[in-house]
Every structure is written in C-alpha cells, then in structure tokens.
Image (tube, helix red, strand yellow):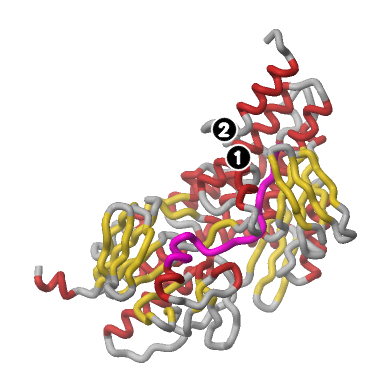
C-alpha cells in the first residue's frame, strides 16, 4: 500500500484522441493513470458526419474506453465531468468527487462558437459529439418525412431547404452527404415529392470553400459539390438564425432570408467549459478561440505539471510551425507527453514537441474527395480511395475496421443508406401541431 501511494499520479481529463492515446502510451508504465471523461467511450470524430447522414451507426464510430484500455492494468477509467481544479493543491474536482494528481493532462477539446449568438444553437446544431450527430440525423430525416406529409408546395419548401453554415472540411462533408442522400440515394423512396428537389446551401464567410486548403483544391471541391447539386454561397455571413430559417448578409451588405427548417452549424469553435476554468485558475494565456498557450513540452508555462493537448492547446512546435487542430496532431501530442513523462522518470533528455504533418483530407461524396498531403495534392477518385484506406486504418479495433469496411463496400455497390432511424423526440413537433391545428380547426 505504501508503495502504491508513492507512485506518480497522472490524471487525464478527456478521452478524445489526445487523452486516449496518452493513456494508451502510459499503459504498463510505473505511473498510476486515471482517465476521466464525461462519456464512457471514445468517438472517432472524423466520421461523425456519416452518423448524421445515416451512413454509419454510433457503434461504428464509438469505442468504450474500458475496452480500449482493458490490458493497461495501471490505467483506471472514470465516467464523470470535471468542473474545477486547484493548481496549488493539485486537486481536480469532478461531479463524483475529487482526484489528487502529480501530473495533469487536459484534453477536453473545443465546443461550438456561435460568435456571441448562443441562442442559435437551439436551431442550428453543430457536430462535435455523437449526441450532436444524432440530433442532426433527426433533423435531416424528419425534414424529408415532414415533406411527405404535405401537398402544399409552399409549406414543403422550407423542409427541403438545407443550410450548412461553414465550408471547412466538416461543412463540405455534410453538404456532400446530404446531397448524395437527396439527389442519389433516396430518389425512389417518397411518393408525394421528389427528394431531388431538395436545395442544399453551403454558406461560407471566406471567398472559397475549404479556405485553409490550397486554392486549386478549393476550386476542385467546389466543382464536385456543384456536380452533386450543392449551392455554394461564399463571402457571406450569417446574421440571424431562428426556427423558420436563416438571414445571410452578402458581400454587398444586403441581407437575404432563406426559409429553412434544417440549419446545420459547421463554423467556429471555442474552448471547452473546463478549458475556460483551467485558464482562470492558472492565469494561462489564451489565443484565438480561447485556446490555451503552451510551451514546447505542451505544458502551461506557469504550471509545468499541467499539460494541455489537442484542440484546446495553442501549439507552436520546435520548428516554429503552428500545429492545426486535427486528430493526427492530437494523437501525436498525447503520445509525446506520455513519452516525455517516461523519459523524465528515467532521467533522460527530452526535446520540444515536433509535429509531423500528415496532411488533411475532405470527402465530398461517392468517388469524390480532395486532399492536401505533404508535398502534393490529390483530388477525385484517387483521393476518395486514399481517404477510405486512411480512415479504415485509423479506426480503433480490428472488429470495427472490418465492420465499417464491409458496410462501405455494401453501400458503395448498392447505394443504400440503412440507418435513417429518427430516434428521440423529433424536432419542431409542437410547432407542427400548432400549425396544423391553426390551419385545420376541425381536427
């Protein structure tokens, strides 16, 4: 018991890519490791849009932490929400108690930013968690089901107008997936209307989609989206969102309202709630989006025992390169901190973090993708095939890789999307009842 008390205690907050891979790397080490997360599973975020579009199930993209870490006997997993920290006493507070730590690794990620208009979140869900994906799925398929219920074209139109705000990789992938559904997959599924009449608008404040990609790839992505029937609206900002639609302000300053029951958010992020608390308690310097600035070891300069990794961290690596908020970067950071702790324990020399850029990719639809990779770019079918291979390989667990691969093969040849279930309380139910009651007083 006395020996156990002397073990160095590492507490990891957040079981995303950074936190999970740090815990895995610290497995079978001399450290006493606790992974704390408000959920009991890891989510493969790059494929959440496929859950939202009914292409995959939640089980395809989520893995229980206990399953992943079951062979790491020195690692304990707890399902609880961290809400405060005392850096002086080195105590982490969570909803089920508190944890003492010697080293704290914070990997709580980011959440949606509505640019000071948090009320928009009620009408325009984002896509960071599996719950968000299921909410999006309800909105998307409920819109089609409601369109089938009416014969009034004016009433139906807002349900068939899909507006995606933000044309980064998530927005582009969502727009492409919904366009595939409406214009290719579900064309024979309805009787009262033609889903090919659905209008998919992709709205971006910059002058092109995928603004962080090379311009050549952006133009190719725009062409691919256009082939799928997506309307691209660039240099345009959203000024209002409500239950009935969205108001957009174009480059000429004029505002335009689009009636839409399905507005999806893919623009802007800010620090997690715990990240904001950590910054207040430690006096950490914050950068764009509320991210916490860390040093070369990925620790807070004022508290070297606290490491911040993943999307929450503002990182410049030892070559002076700004590290992007991507899954590969979070994985590298988690493994780096684990290795650094091990080397420190062995009194070995440590170096500053160096990011290995593996590039980024965005899939736009069947046989369509673009990728900005180290030293070259790729687009079209070859990019799509590479995207498939990379994401199959990146999934955690051989069973999950095989299952997802078989589903993708089946859906590729059959063009069928099976998981269109509307679970939970459908959106706008009360509003629809009120509208129908007003229009049909005898009902």
SS of the residue under disc 1 = helix
Task: Give residue 349's position: percent from left, percent from top.
Answer: 36, 91
Q: Is residue 408 left or right of residue 401?
A: right
User: What residue do we see at 39% from left, 88% from top?
Assistant: 350
Above or below 54: residue 292: below
The label shown at residue 421 is: 2
Residue located beneath label 1 in the image: 137
Q: Is residue 396 left or right of residue 249?
A: left
The answer to whether any part of residue 179 appears in the image is: no
User: What residue do we see at 51% from left, 55% from top?
Assistant: 44
The part of the image, by quadrant, that contains residue 441 is top right
User: What residue do we see at 54% from left, 70% from top?
Assistant: 291
Please tell me which of labels 1 and 2 falls first in the chain.
Answer: 1
Using a 10 Å C-alpha cutoff, classify the residue at mark 2 as few (fewer than 14 neighbours), some (14 to 19) or many (20 or more). Answer: few
Image quarter (top left, top right, bottom left or bottom right) of the N terminus: bottom left
How many marks the image carries: the answer is: 2
Task: Give residue 257's position: percent from left, percent from top.
Answer: 82, 44
User: What residue do we see at 63% from left, 31% from top?
Assistant: 428
The residue stretch that appears in magenta = 261-277
Task: Give residue 327's position: percent from left, percent from top.
Answer: 53, 65
Q: Nearer the viewer, mark 1 or mark 2?
A: 1
Do the residues bearing badges 1 and 2 touch, measured as CB atoms within 8 Å? yes
């Amino acid at each position: 018991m006395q020996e156990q008390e002397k073990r160095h205690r590492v507490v990891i907050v957040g079981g995303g890519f950074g936190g999970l891979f740090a815990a895995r790397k610290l497995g079978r080490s001399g450290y006493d490791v606790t992974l704390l997360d408000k959920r009991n599973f890891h989510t493969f975020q790059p494929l959440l849009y496929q859950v939202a579009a009914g292409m995959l199930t939640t089980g395809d993209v989520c893995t229980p932490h206990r399953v992943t870490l079951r062979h790491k006997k020195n690692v304990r997993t707890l399902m609880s929400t961290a809400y405060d920290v005392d850096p002086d006493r080195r105590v982490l507070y969570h909803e089920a108690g508190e944890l003492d730590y010697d080293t704290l690794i914070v990997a709580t990620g980011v959440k949606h930013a509505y640019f000071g208009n948090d009320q928009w979140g009620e009408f325009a869900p984002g896509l960071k968690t599996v719950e968000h994906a299921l909410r999006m799925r309800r909105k998307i398929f409920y819109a089609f089901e409601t369109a089938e219920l009416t014969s009034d074209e004016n009433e139906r139109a807002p349900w068939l107008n899909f507006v995606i705000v933000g044309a980064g990789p998530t927005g582009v992938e969502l727009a492409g997936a919904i366009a595939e559904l409406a214009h290719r997959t579900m064309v024979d599924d309805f009787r009262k209307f033609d889903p090919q009449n659905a209008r998919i608008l992709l709205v971006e404040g910059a002058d092109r989609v995928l603004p962080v990609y090379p311009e050549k790839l952006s133009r190719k992505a725009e062409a691919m989206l256009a082939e799928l029937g997506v309307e691209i609206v660039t240099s345009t900002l959203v000024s209002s969102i409500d239950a009935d639609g969205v108001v957009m302000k174009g480059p000429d300053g004029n505002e335009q309202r689009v009636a839409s029951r399905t507005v999806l958010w893919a623009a802007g992020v800010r620090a997690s709630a715990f990240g904001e608390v950590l910054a207040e308690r430690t006096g950490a310097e914050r950068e764009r989006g509320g991210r916490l600035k860390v040093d070369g070891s990925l620790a807070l300069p004022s508290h070297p025992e606290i490491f911040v990794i993943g999307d929450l961290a503002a990182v410049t690596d030892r070559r002076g390169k700004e590290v992007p908020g991507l899954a590969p970067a979070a994985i590298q950071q988690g493994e780096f901190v684990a290795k650094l702790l091990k080397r420190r324990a062995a009194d070995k020399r440590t170096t500053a973090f160096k990011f290995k850029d593996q590039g980024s990719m965005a899939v736009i639809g069947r046989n369509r993708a673009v990728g900005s990779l180290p030293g070259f770019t790729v687009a079209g079918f070859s990019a799509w095939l590479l995207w498939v291979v990379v994401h199959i390989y990146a999934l955690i667990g051989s069973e999950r890789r095989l299952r997802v691969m078989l589903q993708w093969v089946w859906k590729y040849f059959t063009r069928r999307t099976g998981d269109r279930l509307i679970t939970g309380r459908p959106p706008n139910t009360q509003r629809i009842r009120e509208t129908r009651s007003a229009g049909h007083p005898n009902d």
